[in-house]
Amino acid sequence: MTRQRFWLGVRYVVLVILALLFMLPFWVIVRNAFSTNKNITSATWNWLPDQLNLTNLTTLLANDSIGILRALLNSAIMAVLQTGGTVFVSLLAGYALARFTHRASRFMLGVTLFTLMVPVATIFVPMFIITAQLGWVDTFRGLVIPGLFSAFATYLFRQYFLDFPVELEDASLVDGCNPWSAFWRVVFPNSKGIVAAVGTIILIGSWNAFLWPSLIGRDATRTVQVALSQFMTSQGVRYPELFMGSLIVVAPMLVVFLFLQRYLVQGLTTSGLR
């Protein structure tokens, strides 16, 4: 019994150390967000700011050239639209790949998995050309629509629906439902865990997206990640505003993760990725 308690204590110590290492970057963001530029760039490290500098927030909000509040709104709009659209498209695609097992569906599954092996950056040039020809530059359509398909989300939904009991769907068909109504009345209500999990992953990815919004977004649709990059120029880096902006950007996703982490773990464990 004593030996078991010893190893249990060792596990807790290791977990605490790993948790502290994981939280260290977040503490650096918080510490630098309320520090002066002299304190941030000092050769000596202090765990606490030399003084609680609240002017970083007012300076950040007062900077009209950056427009951090407008950028936050743009990121929220893009993230919500892309999350809803991607979940809808991937949900139907994953269900179709799981239920229709003929040769064409297996081919489509192979194509879907193949897209996971292609680096995303390699398709940005043709995507930008098509988006520009459609006149979607500096619009939310250009930010959202090209990223609505997610092979990763489609595969997760397919793995989940492979284990979903077909008998429930057959029973609804016997009761008079057609396949479309059976999906929305029976399958979808029993798939909220995986939907929440995939939605959380897509939401965080959309909120943190930088490369595509930097190509498509301009003044009207500049996202917060692109806005933060304006603090890093060839003349130098404005560290206080940059870290304060990073703190503001991290906070919403941290709240989302804390509220939805249970669904995230549940969805991943029920999707075949154990």
Image (cartoon, rainbow, N blue to C red):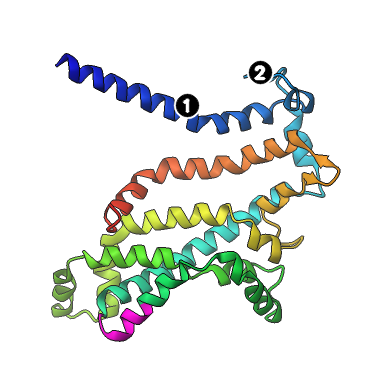
| Highlighted range, magenta | 101-108
Query: What amino acid does circle 1 point to?
Result: Leu
What secondary structure is found at the residue carrying circle 2?
A: loop
Q: Position of residue 35 (x, y in %)?
A: 72, 25
Dividing the picture into quadrants, the one containing residue 169 is bottom left
Reply above or below: 8 against 145. Answer: above
Horizontal arrangement in the rendering, residue 204 relative to residue 94 (left or right): right
Q: Which residue is mark 1?
A: 20
Of residues 71 and 27, the one drawn nearer to the viewer in this rendering: 27
Residue 50 at x, y percent in the picture: 72, 17
For the point 21% across and 64% down, which residue is it?
163
Q: Mark 2 or mark 1: name the one nearer the start of the chain.
A: 1
Regarding mark 1 in the picture, which secondary structure is present there? helix
Q: Residue 54 location, x and y as percent?
A: 72, 27
Is 1 located above or below residue 220 in the figure? Answer: above
Residue at (75% x, 41% y) in the render: 61
Residue 67, placed above or below residue 77: above
- Residue 46, label in figure: 2
